[in-house]
Structures are given as C-alpha cells and as structure tokens.
Amino acid sequence: MSKKRSDLINPNHGVVIHRNFVPLYADDNYAQFFGYQNGKEILELASIFTLINPDQRDVSRSNYNEIMSGEKKPQVRSFRHYNDQGSEFFILAIEQVVNWEGEPALQIAFVDISSLIQAETKIRKSEQRFRDLIEGSIQGMVIHRNFKPLLVNQAYASMHGYESPAEILALDDISIFFTDKSPDLSLARAALILSDKQPDTKQRFKNRRKDGSCLWVELVERKVIWNDQYAIQTTLIDVTEQVIMEEKLTLMAMTDSLTNLYNRRFLMDKSNELFLSNKKNNLPLACILLDLDKFKDVNDEYGHSVGDETLIEFSKRCQTLVQEPYYIGRYGGEEFLVVMPNATVNSAYELAEKIRIKCATEPLLTSAGAFTLTVSAGVSYFKDTDNNFDQLIDRADKRLYEAKALGRNKVMI
C-alpha cells in the first residue's frame, strides 16, 4: 500500500475552507492550531477573521479579495498567529481557490512551522549579538571579491560538501555553486551591495554542492574591507528542509493520496488552463477517460484493501505510459483522466490502446494474487465550437459508455 500523505510531512497540518472568512469546512488539526477541540467548533464561529492576528487582518482581507477577483494567484505564505490563549505560533499556508457547493471559496492548508521559525529566530539573534564570531562558527560564511574566495569558515565548506575551508579557498570562483539564474542574480546583488544599496534579504538561492545535490539558502550580505579593498561578506542560512517541506505541501494539495496521481481538483484546474491556452493559439488538445472494467467485482470478491492495491498498481502502469507533457489523474473512483495538450486524436487513441493492451495482457499483482482487469476508454478532442474543457470530458464519457455497452475492453472515439 502507498504511504499516507501525513507520513511525508513531520509538522502538524490542517485545512480550512472559507468564503469571505465565513468557515465552510475545517478539520480538527486546523481547530487545534487555535486552541479549539475540533473543526465543528470552528464552523460554529461567525467568522474566522477574528482568528487572524490584528496587524495582519487588513493584508489578509486584501489578499482574499485579490485572489477571488483573479487579480492575484494563490501562493504559499508564512504567518504569525496567536491561539485563544494568546500563545504565538507560526504557520506555512498554501492557498487554493476551490468550488464549494457551486460557488468559489478559498481553501488554505496550514503547516505548523513554529519550531523552525524559533530556531531561525535564535540564530538571527545570535548573529545580532555576536556578529562575526557567531556568523563564523554557526552559519556558513565566505568573504569574496568578484566571487574569488578570501575567507571561508568550516560551516560554509561543510554546507557545500567540502571537508575543509582550504578546498574552497583553492577555487578561483565560488559561482560554480550557483544554479539556474543564480549567477546573474548574484552579480546584480554584488553590484547593489558594493554601491551601498541593500538587496532583497528574503530572496532564496539554489546552490549546488560538490556532489551535485541541491542546497537552498537565504543570504545575509554586507560590504566589508579586506586587505584595504572592498569585498563582500556572505552568510548563508540553510533552508533546504523548509523548501522541501513546502514542496511536499504543494504536492499534497495536488495529488490523490491513494494513487499518487494528480487529484481531480488539480487536473480540472490544469485542464481548463490548457483549454484556454490551446483555444487561443488554435492548438490541438485531446483527452482520454479510462474506467476499470468490473472493478466492483474486485471489491466484492477480495475486499476494498485489494481494490485499493489494484488502483495503485493500475496507476503505476499508467505512469510508465503517460509521459510529459501529458497529465494523468484520478478522476473519481476507478475512473482516470488523461489530458494531452498539443496532441491529435490519433495520438490519444494510440495511447489509450497501449494502456488497454497492457492491462489486458499483463496481470495486476496484488496480495490476493495476480489477476487480469481490463479497461475501457473514451477519447475526445478539441473542436472549434467547444467553450470549455467539460465539453471534451462529456464526449469522452459518452464514448466510454459506448465502449462498455459493446462489451468492455475497448477504446472508442
């Protein structure tokens, strides 16, 4: 069986859905963040606006209005909050607009990052109190001129996978640690610092360790004099674990917890986005609606746990066949949807046939033994008269129904 999504993230996490701060749904974890017993107590509140720290309420309301009006996209944010006992805690929040009873609402998934913030706060206070001494012993520090290292501490060397500072000092250019657009950004930052201007201190950089693995850092930089010439002192804060946690939270919001495929909400959002883009640029778009034949018989004969195993094994099989730039997700129950941007109907039919043949010829392996379970599929493609992606799904659903009526284990266009 697959791991539970909660096993992937250590901090507690909770979810709330609201419309103009009137709670529509709240789980128990969210309630307990604020000192309540369960989500039901949250739903009894007239508004969750009072749960927001007073100095953040104006920003929160403005942010809500901009997201719901489409002026701003949902984001991942960090907040300081207080529970009903006045205790301070910090949360990471990922926002998403969802459909709730036919109307848009804002869903926010929370992760308690208090321990992480407290640890970083202690580090920053130590930096303020002991300055160069603490920067040199606790955090990675390098002094460079035009990225030629002049002084390096052990923490900086270890952070980048080197045994000693001497190895770093032997390098001609520490920009070898930079990835993506980091070199250009670093050059621009260096120019600002040397001209006594303060760059954005919250910007994150993706560095590369000696072994090629990824390291995410936030920088504290300043201009210093080294051997009677200006240089830059850079102190690094390793935020790799925090970035990984944010990525896992984002993944949790967009994937189906059982199959690890995209969930229906993400898939429909992405499908509608692709539909508008392809329609605007007059590009082809196709989709496949898949349904496992007689799946109910598996649940009835072997139980729902084996049914879950079957769905997982089928999903793994599909993942080997559905490659980028195509998307596959669990549409509901034993139904799966494949979205194929810039693909013709023939390409969609060929892919559906590959999936059908693989299922018909290769038994699924479960704890109840190996058995063959066929799949039926309906294929549809974009037409000039289409106004939304739902129309493609409706046609694919009708073709799927025809495949079932003709004896299953078929692909219909």
Image (tube, rainbow, N blue to C red):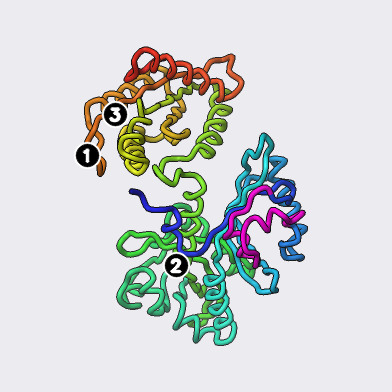
Question: Residue 40, how many percent across, how many down?
Answer: 65, 55
Q: In this orientation, which residue lies closer to the viewer: 139 or 369? A: 369
Label 3 – label 2 distance at C-alpha = 60 Å
Mark before the other along the chain sequence, 2 or 1: 2
Q: Is residue 406 magenta?
A: no
Question: Residue 123, how many percent across, how many down?
Answer: 53, 78
Marks 3 & 2, CB-CB < 8 Å contact:
no
* Residue at left offset 32%, top offset 41%: 306
What residue is shown with label 1? 369
Question: Residue 25, how many percent across, how many down?
Answer: 64, 49
* Residue at left offset 48%, top offset 57%: 182
Local secondary structure at mark 1:
strand
Quarter-wise, where is residue 208 in the image?
bottom left
Q: Which residues are magenta?
A: 24-48
Q: Which mark is residue 60?
A: none
User: Tag 1: Cα neighbours inside 10 Å, few (<14), some, or many (≥20)?
Assistant: few
What residue is shown with label 3? 373
> With 260 as the anchor, is 254 left or right in this view?
right
User: Tag 3: Cα neighbours inside 10 Å, few (<14), some, or many (≥20)?
Assistant: many
* Residue at left offset 46%, top offset 77%: 139
